[in-house]
Image (spheres, rainbow, N blue to C red):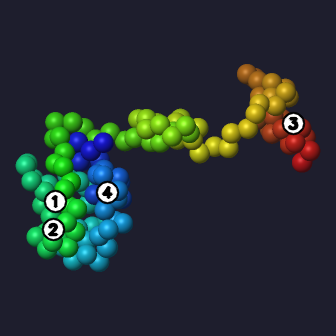
Amino acid sequence: MVGEGSRTSAWYDSWNDFGPLADVISHKEMHRHSYTESTLVLHLRNQNNWLWPPEWISKYPMLAAIPFPDLTQQDKVYWRDFEGNMVQFSSKVAWDTLRPHASEVVWYHMVWFSNYIPRHAFITWLLMRDK
């Protein structure tokens, strides 16, 4: 969710209903109007208005439909979790979404226990996997 825009990429984050602006506005077009790859949403607005180049409004009419953010809020990063729900981003949730999910094996506690030695655990894990 975009708030004041200080942590949201103007081009690559999905901060509006139309998705990342880089999918619509070319890099050449961005640079022609003195924007860079690291432009933030904060740089595209003043206190009450968007600072779109005038020709962009006619070339990309969807820019006029983007609602102005709530400047009293901080930016929040959301992530679609493993079940497809939008949740506030954390590396734990991201890892759980990206990792392969498999059923727990019966020999789990033989390899990974509280005082395991990493080298021994790795070798035991390889042996249990017939590697």
For the residues labelled 1 and 2, say whether their Cβ atoms are less than 8 Å apart.
yes
Residue at the outermost top position: 114
According to the picture, the residue beneath numbered tag 2 turns out to be 57
What SS does tag 4 mark? loop
**Looking at the image, is mark 4 or mark 3 earlier in the sequence?**
4
What SS does tag 3 mark? helix
Measure the alpha-carbon separation of dots 3 and 1.
Answer: 61 Å
Mark drawn on residue 82: none
Measure the alpha-carbon separation of dots 1 and 2.
Answer: 6 Å
The structure residue drawn at horizontal position 35% and vertical position 52%, both measured from the top left corner, is 14
**Looking at the image, is mark 1 or mark 2 earlier in the sequence?**
2
For the residues labelled 4 and 3, say whether their Cβ atoms are less than 8 Å apart.
no
Up the image or down, 49 lies above or below 123; here it is below
Measure the alpha-carbon separation of dots 4 and 3.
Answer: 50 Å
Q: In the figure, is residue 114 to the left or right of 64? A: right
What SS does tag 2 mark? helix
Q: Identify the amino acid type marked 3.
A: Thr
Q: Identify the amino acid type marked 1.
A: Ala
Q: Quadrant of residue 27?
A: bottom left
Q: Quadrant of residue 39?
A: bottom left
Measure the alpha-carbon separation of dots 3 and 2.
Answer: 62 Å
Q: In the figure, is residue 54 to the left or right of 3? A: left
Up the image or down, 53 lies above or below 117; here it is below
The structure residue drawn at horizontal position 32% and vertical position 39%, both measured from the top left corner, is 76
Q: Identify the amino acid type marked 4.
A: Phe
> Residue 34, position in %: x, y?
19, 71
